[in-house]
Amino acid sequence: IGTHRGLNKLEIENEKFTAYVPAQPNSNGISSERILSIFEDSNRMLWVGTYKGGLNKFDRDKQHFVHYRHDPNNQNTISGNNIRCIFEDSRRRLWIGTDSGLNRMDRGENRFIQYRHRQNNRRSISHDTVRCIFEDKQNRLWIGTDMGLNRFDRKTKQFTRYKHRANDPRSIADNAILSLFQDSGENIWIGTSGNGISQINHNAEQFNSLHFGLE
């Protein structure tokens, strides 16, 4: 359980909580008390994303954390220290969304490949604040940002952007993307911030939007 006052582990059998809070600077404790994301990969490694403290890898045997932080002098480090989401794709590649771009972790070399928004490059990611990452059943990678939805082409390393257009009812409902999901009919559902849900068929690039009024 991630809170604004540390990470907690609940042992369900005896309802016992263990709290993990930052210790002294540069120690093996968790790097920040504000937890934004938690993810377990296919190797049962636990990853914890924090606010301002970067990415943490938890070593269950030693009961300590390994820290990955942004270093402005090293382009092979993670691009930012606010870790919004963590995702492992079908190739067992780890993707990390931050407030400063998308990252793919090369676990073999312990380095990060950064994907940043470039103002003059329409094939770059549409915004550096990444809220969600998802892989569909066709193994396509989708990234939700604060400024639209992106589909990533692994071969070309380029992004296709999908944005809301005010006069186009077939465009996505809103540009702030918070969640992604694919149903049993292989339709992708997109949750937005403040303007409802959009749905896209995997064979088309047209969106159907559902708007729900608040009571």
Image: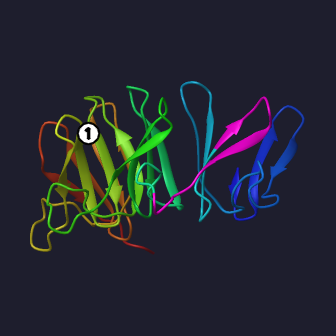
Residue 161 quadrant: bottom left
Image quadrant occupied by the C terminus: bottom left
Visible in this render: residue 37?
Answer: yes
Residue 172 is left or right of residue 176, and the answer is left
Q: Nearer the viewer, residue 113 or 137?
A: 113
Residue drawn at x 75%, y 58% as measured from the top left: 6
**Up-down relation of residue 149 to residue 12 (above or below):** below
Q: Position of residue 113 (x, y in %)?
A: 37, 45
- Report the span colored magenta: 57-73
Is residue 37 one of those drawn in magenta?
A: no
Q: Nearer the viewer, residue 12 or 140?
A: 140
Report which residue position mark 1 lands on.
187
**Up-down relation of residue 180 to residue 80 (above or below):** above
Q: Position of residue 120 (x, y in %)?
A: 14, 67
Visible in this render: residue 179?
Answer: no
State the count of labels: 1
Residue drawn at x 85%, y 46% as measured from the top left: 18
Dot 1 alpha-carbon crowd within 10 angstroms: few under 14, some 14 to 19, many 20 or more: some
Residue 20 is left or right of residue 175, and the answer is right
Q: Nearer the viewer, residue 14 or 5?
A: 5
Residue 190 is left or right of residue 123, and the answer is right
Q: Position of residue 131 (x, y in %)?
A: 42, 57
Residue at disc 1, secondary structure: strand
Is residue 63 one of those drawn in magenta?
A: yes
Q: Nearer the viewer, residue 40 or 191?
A: 40
Residue drawn at x 34%, y 55% as measured from the top left: 144
Residue 98 quadrant: bottom left
Q: Position of residue 207 (x, y in %)?
A: 18, 53
Residue 79 is left or right of residue 173, and the answer is right
